[in-house]
Image (cartoon, coloured by chain):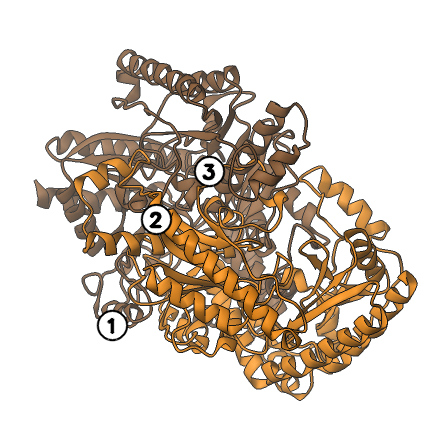
Chain colours: A orange, B brown
């Protein structure tokens, strides 16, 4: 109803075609009119309506993680509106998954176009019966932002499925390499049916302390961020290497950080050798360019170059998980582009801001045996193609770089002002974070900020992560910093 | 363009509102006008345009499984139209995932309604920030067809994610039971971070020979249908029990089949005891009511009742995987409803025809720790609610039962006529299958049927499975049987 009212306001009694033209002309003009001018709080959060709905939903499913209920129709741009009519500046964006804000007019226009109805109501089994425009849509969306050296892409439904299938692709590639050809032996075929080697081989994926790669059982064996993710779920005997624990700002601790990274690289290589010796060789290495869920941990391009070389040396595939970092928030489409490498990875997975899950891969990591019923969703590719158009048209990567600098500088200032509370401000683009003195204070700050109209998320033991949409401008940064400052002043 | 032309045909120059009214009035009248009157073949399949597109897509991803490219805009009801303008009666429906045919007017109308634009462009993180209408939408869609004894449901993005998370729920439930409470020990917490017991416990899921439960790594460890699914992917040491290999028609072999089922139940119990003795107890049992991918293998209600009792006796959760069987094709919403049990399962998972993945579960299998970013997609719940309305309004479950009888009787007749080619005709509702004398003949029949305008799928070693949409009427059965008869006559 809210959205309809909004559409009616601007185009009462127009034909759909005319309405579409109107939105089309208006969109490039300015983002401003599709955004609110600031937070507006009517109740503490969750308000009474959210509480009633939480109770209602509690009869149907676990609501332990529900923050509040949203009025998505009334939400606009950087502002999320809740069911109690509270309007919050959203610096968390649905766990970093809303690329260009709420109800972007370009996306509304796209979805209102009757040409796309068929894509919405006829979801195909993409692996067997793709739609006519599928190659073109892939080319215009995902392939138009391919990471360096990658011309092939496989879509999937979510981040976990993307990583699961990327791991499978690496295992199959590794076994083919071991065999010297693609033909499994009779023993491979018979043993795999009962979950035994050599058909189901003893192979592993190496991951890092603090890493997060999803929660399905393969992914979960490479996730090492919080116990709550892993508890009580059987796992694989796969190796974990240390992720560098750097000091910030990075440029002030180059020597110390280089030492820490050298230590981690050395241990990584030791672990690879050790797992090979115990008969469970590492087929692939998976890593985030910035560990997100695990606490926004950065590492230098040199570290990643070193790791890439170790992967090559030991014959392991190198998988860069860009599920949270991908899509522009670091100021580039892919965070790993900041490494400046020609051949940065064998596999790059994505989801969240890309709206569809999936992974790019090298030619040789492309087994026929990666398959499931849906293999993605063309309606999400459609949205993604338009999101990328908006990013280009509105120069959003430049905007992100500019807003990101303002955000990080603001965090440095606050850190200087509140040294007892804040430390380790860090970030790339608007993909920023800061540490709070302890977990209890962190949680109190998150709730107080929310009651003042700023929605944030935590990560790691005691960090706050900033994950605004790509349309988060410098003036949004200042709105945020002012409110954050107020919250900190109360905690001083 | 095709769909737009179609919409224009019926409503040239109407306002959107009027168009919607038109569709709304027309829909209940009859399905006929939204269906074609029969197959129409212009080329062999894949035709030249499909071949060109396959080559184009081959530059981007593996196309080893692509059959042909589709014109979804021109497809209607039970007929899939390809890019070479071939129109095929679809008895496979995107691997059993299209519930009420292509471009159903009720779904077109729903997606053309501007009230739903916001749901299409603002995908929330459902676990933390659900939309206002989420409890109502769940109630009106999934909960309106809850299996017996189940009042709780969790949505997920796809079938594999549904099963992965159902397994996790069973593991967590089992560990809580073992501990006697929900609080993990310090040792649980510290060991889980490095993939070790007791935090990541040695627990297993028991599955069945010939079962299929998905292809992510947890699911894959319970899948035992074809080697190609499992080859080269590491697995868990989890037990597999025999699924009954029955003789058809079931009612003619009750004594032999009862013996076979008793044998399988006995072995299942032995396996559970054995795995407990070796320190890897069975936390849950997962089974399909009809093994689909594995060859359309049926078992009797008595078998499932016996299995349910074994699960209770040994303290294992009982998970019925209805990803392929659910959604009405057996003549009931859930195939397991044919068992006639009050308390058939602890968990029932779904996807495909339900348009969203997810699982129903008992209260006690509801851990806070089941979580991911999206946890489903409200735009799919929206479609599902309307699909269920159509099923009720058009009495589609009754239609399925009627069409299914005609289909199975037709298969019995053909089997009598071609005893050298056909055997073991079987089915429930339109969820039918028949065996072919050998794999090569099966594949030749599938291709010939396709060239004559009938799209079918294989399953198991040498079966053909029939998976029409719920709008497949008796006259569609006859169109199919006539063409199938022609194909068989050529093979005689």
Q: Quadrant of residue A465?
A: bottom right
Separation of marks 3 and 2 at Cα, in angstroms: 44 Å
Q: Are marks 1 and 3 in contact (CB under 8 Å)?
A: no
Closer to viewer: mark 2 or mark 1: 2
Q: Is residue B325 toward the left or the right of residue A489 in the image?
A: left
Circle 1 chain: B
Which chain's residue wears label 2? A
Residue holding disc 3: B326
- Residue on which disc 2 sits: A276
Q: Position of residue B354 (x, y in %)?
A: 50, 45
The Cα atoms of the two marked residues, 2 and 1, are separated by 45 Å
Quarter of the image with the C terminus of chain A is bottom right
Left or right: A335, with A131 as reference point: right
Residue placed most toward the observer, B411 or A305: A305
Is residue A170 depicted above or below A434 in this figure? Answer: above
- Mark toward the viewer: 3 or 2: 2
Residue at the disc numbered 1: B52
Front residue (pair A27, B144): A27
**1 or 3: tag closer to the N-terminus:** 1
Q: Residue at x 60, y 26 (%)?
A: B149
């Amino acid at each position: 109803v809210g959205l309809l009212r909004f559409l009616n306001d601007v185009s009462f009694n127009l034909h759909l075609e005319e309405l579409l033209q109107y939105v089309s002309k208006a969109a490039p003009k300015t983002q401003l009119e599709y955004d609110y001018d600031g937070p507006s709080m009517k109740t503490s959060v969750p308000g009474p309506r959210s509480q009633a709905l939480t109770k209602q939903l509690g009869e149907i499913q676990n609501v332990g993680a529900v923050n509040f209920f949203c009025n998505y129709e009334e939400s606009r741009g950087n502002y999320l509106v809740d069911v109690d009519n509270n309007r919050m500046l959203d610096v968390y964006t649905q766990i970093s998954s809303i690329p260009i804000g709420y109800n972007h007019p370009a996306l509304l226009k796209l979805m209102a176009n009757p040409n796309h109805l068929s894509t919405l109501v006829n979801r195909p089994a993409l692996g067997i019966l793709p739609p006519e425009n599928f190659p073109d849509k892939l080319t215009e969306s995902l392939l138009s932002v391919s990471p360096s050296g990658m011309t092939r892409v496989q879509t999937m439904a979510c981040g976990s499925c993307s990583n699961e299938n990327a791991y499978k692709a690496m295992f199959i590639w590794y076994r083919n390499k071991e065999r010297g050809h693609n033909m499994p032996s009779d023993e491979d075929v018979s043993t795999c049916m009962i979950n035994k080697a050599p058909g189901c081989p003893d192979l592993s994926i190496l991951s890092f302390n603090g890493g997060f790669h999803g929660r399905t059982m393969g992914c979960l064996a490479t996730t090492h961020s919080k116990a709550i993710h892993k508890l009580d779920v059987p796992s694989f005997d796969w190796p974990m290497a240390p992720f560098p624990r750097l000091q910030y700002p990075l440029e002030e601790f180059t020597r110390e950080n280089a030492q820490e990274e050298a230590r981690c690289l050395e241990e990584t290589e030791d672990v690879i050798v050790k797992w090979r010796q115990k008969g469970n060789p590492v087929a692939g290495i998976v890593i985030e360019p910035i560990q997100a869920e695990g606490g926004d941990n950065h590492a230098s391009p040199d570290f990643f170059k070193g790791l890439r070389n170790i992967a090559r040396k030991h014959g392991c595939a190198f998988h860069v998980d860009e599920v949270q970092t991908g899509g522009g928030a670091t100021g580039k489409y892919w965070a790993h582009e900041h490494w400046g490498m020609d051949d940065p990875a064998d596999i790059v997975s994505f989801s969240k801001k890309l709206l569809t899950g999936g992974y790019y891969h090298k030619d040789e990591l492309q087994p026929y045996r990666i398959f499931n019923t849906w293999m993605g969703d063309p309606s999400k590719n459609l949205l993604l193609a338009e999101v990328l158009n908006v990013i280009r048209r509105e120069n959003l990567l430049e905007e992100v770089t500019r807003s990101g600098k303002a955000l990080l500088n603001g965090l440095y200032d606050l850190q200087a002002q509140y040294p007892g509370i804040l430390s380790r401000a860090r970030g790339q683009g608007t993909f920023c974070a800061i540490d709070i003195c302890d977990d209890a204070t962190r949680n109190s700050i998150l709730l107080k900020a929310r009651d003042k109209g700023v929605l944030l998320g935590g990560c790691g033991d005691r960090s706050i992560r900033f994950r605004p949409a790509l349309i988060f401008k410098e003036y949004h940064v200042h709105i945020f910093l002012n409110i954050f400052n107020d919250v900190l002043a109360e905690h001083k």
